[in-house]
Structure formats: C-alpha cells, structure tokens
Amino acid sequence: MTRMKKRTAKRRKMVMRRIWVERGTAQVVEQRMEMVMVTLTIILTYESLKYNERS
C-alpha cells in the first residue's frame, strides 16, 4: 500500500513539473514572438523611412 502511494506521488510530481515546464516554455515563446514582432516593425519602419528619403 505505502509503495503504491509513493509511486503515485512521484508520478503526480512529474506531471506537475511537466505542466510547469510547458507553461514556462509557452511564456518564453510568447515573449520571444513579441520581441521578434517589435524588431520587425522597427526594421520595416526604418526601411520605409530610408526609402521615402531616397525618393
């Protein structure tokens, strides 16, 4: 009985950890995407300004 309980506890911990890891990675990916979007917009605006100045 005690062995089974320990096993289930361990399994539950693993699952929880996995969920936490997934959440963390999702947040990181979202942040990275935001950064990429910001950098892209900055580059695009810069390029458009350059182009407008040229013409």
Image (cartoon, rainbow, N blue to C red):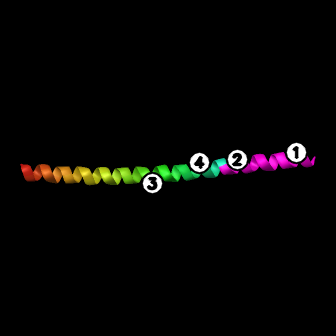
Q: Which residue is mark 3?
A: 31
- In this rendering, position of residue 2 left or right of residue 43: right
> Would residue 44 be found to the left or right of residue 12 on screen?
left
Q: What amino acid is at disc 1?
A: Met
Alpha carbon distance from label 1 to label 4? 27 Å
In the visual, does 5 lie left or right of 24? right
Who comes first in sequence, dot 1 or dot 3? 1
Report, in whole angstroms, how far the alpha carbon at label 4 lies from the one at label 3: 14 Å
Q: Amino acid at mark 4?
A: Glu
| Within-10-Å neighbours for mark 2: few <14, some 14–19, many 20+ | few
Q: CA distance from mark 2 to mark 1?
A: 16 Å
- Find out whether the residues at labels 2 and 1 contact each other: C-beta distance under 8 Å: no
Whether the magenta-drawn stretch holds residue 14 is answered as yes
Residue 7 on image: x %, y %: 83, 45
Judging by the rendered image, the residue that carries numbered circle 1 is 4
Residue that mark 2 sits on: 15
Dot label at residue 36:
none
Compared across the picture, whether 7 is left or right of 34 comes to right
